[in-house]
Image (tube, coloured by chain):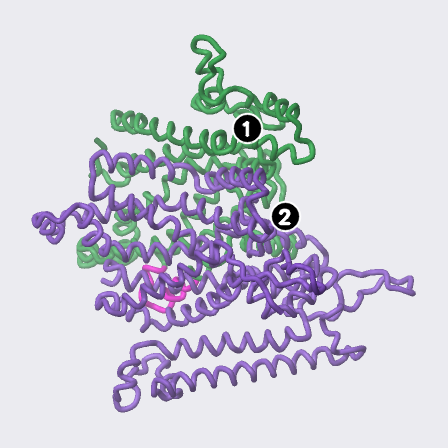
Amino acid sequence: MLAYVIRRLLYAIPILIGVNLLTFALFFVVNTPDDMARMQLGVKRVTPDAIQKWKAERGYDKPLVWNAAAAGTAAVTDTIFFSKSVRMFAADFGRADDGRDIAREIATRMGPSLAIAVPTFVLGLFVAIAFALLLVFFRATTLDFTGVVLCVAMMSISGLFYIIGGQWLVSKVWHLAPISGYSGGLDAGKFLILPVIIGVIGGIGSSPRWYRTIFLEEITRDYVRTARAKGLPERVVLFRHVLRNALIPILTGVVVVIPTLFMGSLLTESFFGIPGLGSYTIDAINAQDFAVVRSMVFIGSVLYIVGLLLTDISYTLADPRVRLQ
Amino acid sequence: MSFQVVFLWSDVLLFVLIAAIVALILWARRQDALRAAWGRVARDGMAMAAATVLAAFVIIGLLDSLHYRPRLDARPGEPVRYAVEVHSALDALLSDLRQRSEKTYSAPLATHLFAKEALENSTQREFPRLKHGGTHLGADLANHEFDIALRVSRGCAGGVALWLLLTTLWCRLKGLELLAVLAAMKPGADLKVGAGDTAIGAEKNVATGAVFVTLLAILLLLGIAVALGGGYHVFGTDKVGQDVLYLSLKSIRTGLLIGTLTTLVMLPLAVLLGILAGYVGGWVDDVIQYLYTTLSSIPGVLLIAAAVLMMQVIIDTHPDWFATSAERADARLLALCLILGMTSWTGVARLLRGETLKLRELEFVQAAQAFGVGRFAIMRRHILPNLMHIVLIALVMDFSGLVLAEAVLSYVGVGVDPTTISFGTMINTARMELAREPMVWWSLAAAFTFMFALVLAANLFADAVRDAFDPRSSA
């Protein structure tokens, strides 16, 4: 098991290098730093001096990959590629355009992001599985049919609608929760409740239908017939036998998401004014702060790879027959 | 009035796509297996109703893809010049809606502006009358509601008349009885209408009734919209006084383009790499797997955001590439499709690779190998046709997700050009106004309603197609 984890981690290295090269190519080769400077400074203020200053402020005035002017190892290290891309492996993301340290900013913004994402994820998963089991329990009845139709309809509604509609109904008409905002400590609860509920409702559309299919596939198996034949009530069959056996396909889609919860949700955080990583990313995109976007891309892929690894490990926990070699 | 026809890149691609679909339909008619599968879709009432709605959207989108630049009035002797604005056939049809703009917000079917203004010769602030909405009423505002009711009933009557005309014509053509077709809709009713005569026998399995009923609903809405739209702003006006109905209809093309072109640009790559990885194996497989694992390990939104930011830099630093702003917006739309496609081909490639691995071991492929058929011939002739159902399912399943994604991306700021009319830009501009008191809800409601109709129809149709083509789910 440990050997497997180590080997998987080693596999992750070339992928991360690939991501790193890709972001480097996207941000520095497709457009030269001069182009970026011209775009950010605007047409009026572009002078060669201004471009030089803009580049020097961000450390973009070095050669791309090979510094012929420097001696020794500095020829490699004193370049944009090394200082901006390679150093990300050491969690050194540099500074944002407003001069703040990106790594530090990420560390402080992780808390609020998790405060929203974790309850939404846990509750959402619970509701989705419960709903799917309900549909399977009443399979081939009007309730099942209505539930499936409801899922398709809810899936067809834009996520923006849930947020805007929820804010309007709950906060503006019913005055039950603040429209947006955030505070630390226990006070956070009243700010969190609305985004969490909206997140759960917004997720109902897609996953229960998928889980229902998995359960229905599982329910035709022999062991289910055996369980029924020995007189177990349908409730027990579903919860103890079907649910546990259906866990593997469910885990595949679910566990991989867990690490990326750190990244927060772009939409929810920006609509509810929560100072998490999601709103940080959106602000960076709107301000065209390339350094922050680059760092978030890298962190996102690291977390995704961790998620894949966790998925494999979770298989062994769900099904002892699965051996990782 | 003369004009100069303009072909935007997206128009060309859209028409190529339509031509490809028509060719595919003609080809599929001759294939028994495909005919059987599509026959299953055609027998599904829900699917056919959804297809009718989709067809209505597609017609609007196609009308909106015939672009031209009207000629400017010139004195004799001057060289001929064309307007900078690019219009479409839909714009020409809706020129009333497009040109009758108000000053700012007005509620649906309103006769007065939404904001108070100081009137001339008066110290009081009043709601001024609209320039176009309800002007035919004159000073007699007591008639407002009666006029609306009258127009609605006239619109309904027109819609029903048009429906009767179309359906009777169709039935006459096919030798069917309209009432019999509709009676066959009843649950449990056997589709064998009449004494099993041949004409009905050929058509009995197609859910014609569902199509007719959906068509009636669409034509009713159309009739009401036309009748009301003649004198009012049916969905009100937005901040700069543009008719919201017009904006919603223009958004359809953007949604359709993003939903279809994205999958189209990614398909050749996904199919090629998926089959190569699965069939050739070895280092080719390793490289391709590495490629898509790397791409898919970057969270989609972030990769799209990064790529769109970079594309913006390119477009902004090369203003000389584009003759009109419409061309620039169009280039940006296409680039967005390309970027969305690049980030989403990985899933399809993975599926195709897995399926190819399975197919490679089957007898017919091994027989072909034994006969000495070349690798690429096997991939093209034996593997590819057996993967087409996956490709088709991916195409229809992705559509609705992409339409929804456009709205989110436009909100994030990495969507279509702000001058392109789309559901995303509509929602984005309307969102700010929810805080007003009283609320400006109509642009949001219109955008969400149109989007919901489009996506729901696409989802229902996609489900039917998947059920018909996926051998696993039909069991």
Residue for point 23% across, 60% down: B471
Q: Chain of mark 2?
A: A
The Cα atoms of the two marked residues, 1 and 2, are separated by: 40 Å
The residue that appears at 32% across and 68% down in the rendered structure is B41
Horizontal and vertical percent position of residue A275: 59, 36
Farthest residue to the left: give it.
B370
Residue wearing tag 1: A33
Residue B364: x %, y % from top left:
12, 53
- Identify the residue at horizontal 59%, vertical 46% (top origin): A271
Quarter occupied by the C terminus of chain B: bottom left
B5 left or right of A134 in image = right
Q: Is residue B30 above or below residue A73?
A: below
Q: Outermost residue, front direction?
A: B77
Q: Are marks 1 and 2 in contact (CB under 8 Å)?
A: no
- Mark found first going from the N terminus, 1 or 2: 1
Question: Which residue is found at the position 59% from the left and 80% from the top?
Answer: B155
Secondary structure of the residue carrying tag 1 is: helix
Residue B107 visible in rendering: yes
Residue bearing the label numbered 2: A179
Question: What residue span does the magenta drawing correspond to?
Answer: A135-150
| Front residue of B71 and B369 | B71
Which chain's residue wears label 1? A
Amino acid at pointer 1: Pro
Query: Principal SS element in the magenta part?
Result: helix
Q: Which chain is green?
A: A
Q: Which hue belongs to chain B?
A: purple
Q: Is residue A250 magenta?
A: no
The answer to whether residue A131 is left or right of residue B277 is right
